[in-house]
Every structure is written in structure tokens, then in C-alpha cells.
Image (cartoon, grey):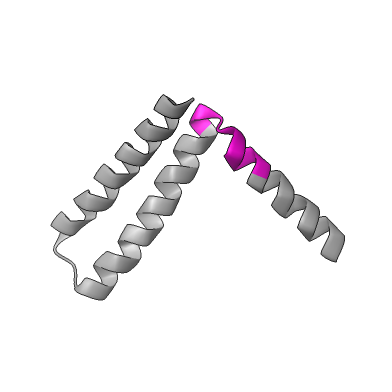
Amino acid sequence: MIYKTLLSVVLMGVSVYAVNFLGLGSIWTCGLQIITGVVTYVLFSMLFKHESFYYIINFAKKLLKKSS
């Protein structure tokens, strides 16, 4: 389990670091790094079926159902 999480974090870090080489301005680079990091981590969490990720998703769904 810890290896899947570590792999997800490393791959996210590599993808976020790669955004630096696009040559965008500081604000655009920062925004794109945040979006890239979130998308990459979510995709790998779904791929590796991280238990904590699905716990948070289910918790958010319950909160949304409760508020509507």
C-alpha cells in the first residue's frame, strides 16, 4: 500500500516539476502546477484504488446529500 502512495507522489512531483519547462510566467506556472498536481494525484489514486481517497469521496458525497 505504501509503495502505491509513494509512486503516486513521485509521479505527481515529476509532472509538476515538468511544468517549469513550459516557459510560462510565474503566475501561470504556479496555477498550472497546482492543477497538474491535483489531476495527477486524483488519477493515480483512482488507478491504484487508494482507500483514503475513496473515503474522502464518499464523505463528500454524504455531505452533499445531507445539505440538499
Image spot of residue 44 (x, y percent): 45, 36
Whether 24 is drawn above or below 21: the answer is below
The answer to if 13 sits in the magenta stretch is: no
Q: Main secondary structure of the magenta part?
A: helix
Residue 29 placement: quadrant: bottom left
Whether 36 is drawn above or below 51: the answer is below
The answer to if 51 sits in the magenta stretch is: yes
Q: Residue at x 44, y 44 (%)?
A: 41
Say if residue 60 shows up in the picture: yes
Q: Residue at x 34, y 67 (%)?
A: 31
Say if residue 68 shows up in the picture: no
Image spot of residue 30 (x, y percent): 29, 67
Give 42 or 4, whichever is nearer the viewer: 4
Is 8 positioned to the left or the right of 61 in the image?
A: left
Residues rendered magenta in the picture: 47-55
Is 1 positioned to the left or the right of 65 in the image?
A: left
Image spot of residue 48 (x, y percent): 50, 28
Q: How many marks?
A: 0
Whether 12 is drawn above or below 62: the answer is above
**Quadrant of the frame with the C terminus:** bottom right
Is 36 positioned to the left or the right of 54 in the image?
A: left
Image spot of residue 67 (x, y percent): 83, 65
Is 52 positioned to the left or the right of 41 in the image?
A: right
Q: Residue at x 78, y 58 (%)?
A: 63
